[in-house]
Amino acid sequence: LSAVLVTGGSGFIGVPVLRELARREHVVHALHCRSAPVDISGVRWHRVDLAAPAELDAIVAELRPQELIHLAWYVKHGRFWDAPENVPWVERSLHLMRAFARAGGRRAVMLGTCAEYDWSAADAPLSERSSPLGPATLYGVAKDALRRLASKYAEQVGFEFAWGRLFFLYGPNEAPGRLVASVASSLLRGEPAETSSGTQRRDFLHVDDVARAVGALLDSSVQGPVNIASGEDQKLADVVECIAQTVGRPELLRIGALADRPGEPPRLVGDTRRLREEVEFRPAKDLHTGIAETVGWWRDKLSDSK
Amino acid sequence: LSAVLVTGGSGFIGVPVLRELARREHVVHALHCRSAPVDISGVRWHRVDLAAPAELDAIVAELRPQELIHLAWYVKHGRFWDAPENVPWVERSLHLMRAFARAGGRRAVMLGTCAEYDWSAADAPLSERSSPLGPATLYGVAKDALRRLASKYAEQVGFEFAWGRLFFLYGPNEAPGRLVASVASSLLRGEPAETSSGTQRRDFLHVDDVARAVGALLDSSVQGPVNIASGEDQKLADVVECIAQTVGRPELLRIGALADRPGEPPRLVGDTRRLREEVEFRPAKDLHTGIAETVGWWRDKLSDSK
C-alpha cells in the first residue's frame, strides 16, 4: 500500500479528505502545525511547519511518500483574495513539490481555484480545455502560476501531477464568515441574515463531495487541471432561501439588504465533463440534502456552545 | 541618491550592468556568492547566498534598498532550458521580492526571456502587447510564472515592477559554449567551427547594450514587460560569417555541418517600440562593431592564456 502525504489535513477540506483517504485504505501521513490534529483511524500526524524548509525536507525524506495531496494555503475569509501571504504559499508549495520529487514521489494532487479563469468572459460553463484563464486576484494569480510551474516541472522530472480546481464549497466546519455558514448560524441564533440581491449564479459542492472527488482524483491517472464542481449553477437567493426554509425562519432573511459587489460575474459554473468521464466521479449530495445536513451541524454546534 | 541592490552582479550581464549603474551615479550594493566580486568603482559587494533566506532577509533589512535589479538565475549553457534548478530560482526570486517590499523598496527590475512567447506562432516581431505567450521550456515557464506573480504582488503591495525580456545576447565574457563565443574562440585557435544551416533569424543585442537598456529601464517609470532587443533579425549564417571575416579565417567555417534542431522557429525578433518610445533607449553598437569588439576580447583572452 502506497503512503500519501497530506498537507492542510486539519482544515475545512482537509478533515473530510483524510476520512476519504482512510476509507480508500491509503496509508496516510498528515502534517499539521498550528491546528490540533483530528483523530482519524489510519491517519498518522506529524508536526511540521511548512514555512520551515528544513523541517519539511526532513519529514519528506523520512517518510518517502509515493503520493502527495497538498491542501494547505492561506485562506482567511475576506482577506485571502488579495493577501500578500499568497506569495510565500507559492514558495512553500514549490519547495514541498521538489522535496517530494527528490524522495521518489510518483503522483501529486494540488488544489486550484475557479478564480484562475477569466471571470469577465465567464458565462458558459468554465472548461479546463477551452475557457480562457485570466485571474484577477493575487490568490488566482498565485494558484495559476503554481499550476503552470508544477505541471512543467512534473513533466520534466517525471511524476504525475493533477490539479483540482475548486468552485464554491459549503458544509460543516466552514469558516463562520462565509456565505452558507454565516446565514445558517445567524438564522439559528434568531438573528436576521442580510444578503446581496442573490441573482448571481454559483456552482456549489458539499465539502464531503469535494473530498470524495480529491480521493478519486488521487486514485485516477488523470493529469492536469480538473474542475471539482457540481456542474449546476444555483442562484444565491435560492441557496439562502433553502437555508432559511431548513432552519424554519424565512422571515429573518433580508435578501437585497446588501449591495452587490461591482464587477461580480453573473454566473460561475464548472464544466464537469473531465471530472465525470475521466475521474469517474459523481457528487453524492444534492444541494437540499447538503444544506439540511450543514444546518443540522450548526444547530448542534450552537447548542453545544450554550 | 537612492541605493540599488543588484543580484547576479558578477555574471555575464551583471558586470556591464554594475558599470552602467555606476556611470548613472547610483549607490550600488551587489550581492555575490560563489563568484569573486569584480572591482568596479562605486560598487559595494556583499557575500550572500540567495539560497539561504535568512542571509538574504538580513542584508535587505540592513541595506533597505529603494531599488532592486534581480539578474541572478541558473544559466548553465546547454542545461538551463529544462533544468529543475529553474524552480528554486523562482522560490528565491519571490523571497527576495518580499524582503525588498518589506524593507520599503520602491522599484524592482527583473529579467525575463523571449522564451516566454509562444514560439510556434512566432514570425512577426514579438510584441509585449499583442503576441501570445506560451513557453515550451521549464526556463520559459519559470520566468513566465515569476513575472505573473511579481507583477500582481507589486501592484497589490505598492511598488513599481518592470520586466526586461531578453532576446539573444553576445559580447565579452560570454559562456564559452554559446554561439558567438564558441565560433570566435574556435576560429581564433585555428580550429574549424561547425554550425547548423544558419537560416534561422535571431535578434542579437550586445551585452553592453543590454546593460544600458537595464539601466535605462531602472531609471524610467515604465512597468510590466519590455523587450530588450535590437529589433533587427540576423540570419545566424550572417552572424558567424561576420565573425569569420573579423577573425580572418572564413575557410574554417563549416556552415551546415550540424543538423538543425527539429522545431526550431525560423525567426525570433523583438518588437522594440516600448523600449524605444517609453524607455527611450537605442542600441549603441551595431552587430559588426559588437562582433569586432567581441572577437578582440577573445583574441586577448586566448593570447593571455598561452
Image: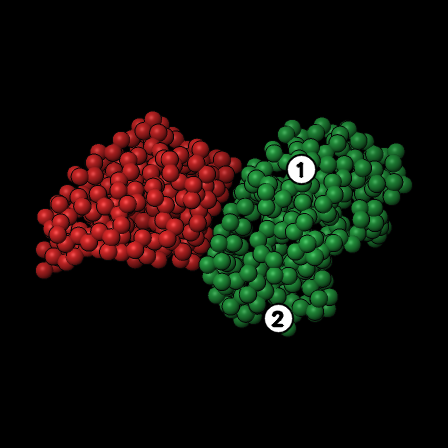
Chain colours: A red, B green
Across and down, in percent, residue A281 comes to 29, 30
Across and down, in percent, residue A66 comes to 38, 37
Q: Which amino acid type corresponds to the residue marked 1 in the rendered image?
A: Ala
Apparent side of residue B76 relative to residue A93 in the rendered image (left or right): right
Q: Please determine if labels 1 and 2 lie on a single subunit.
A: yes
Task: Give the mark, 1 or 2, whose residue is nearer the N terminus.
Answer: 2
Query: Quadrant of residue B24 in the image?
Result: bottom right
Nearest the eye: A285 or B5 = A285
- The residue beneath circle 1 is B124
Indicate whether A31 appears above or below A306. Answer: above
Apparent side of residue B279 relative to residue A190 in the rendered image (left or right): right
Query: Quadrant of residue A227 in the image?
Result: top left
Protein chain holding label 2: B
Gap between marks 1 and 2 measured at Cα: 39 Å
**Label 2, residues with CA under 10 Å away: few <14, some 14-19, many ≥20:** few
**Label 1, residues with CA under 10 Å away: few <14, some 14-19, many ≥20:** few
Q: At 61% from the left edge and 69% from the top edge, which residue is drawn?
A: B3
Across and down, in percent, residue A130 comes to 44, 33
Q: Report whether residue B132 is seen.
A: yes
Element type at marker 2?
loop
Q: Which amino acid type corresponds to the residue marked 2 in the rendered image?
A: Ser
Locate the C terminus of chain A by quadrant: bottom left
Across and down, in percent, residue A39 comes to 20, 48
Q: At 76% from the left edge and 36% from the top edge, which residue is drawn?
A: B235
Q: Nearer the viewer, mark 1 or mark 2?
A: 1
- The residue beneath circle 2 is B2
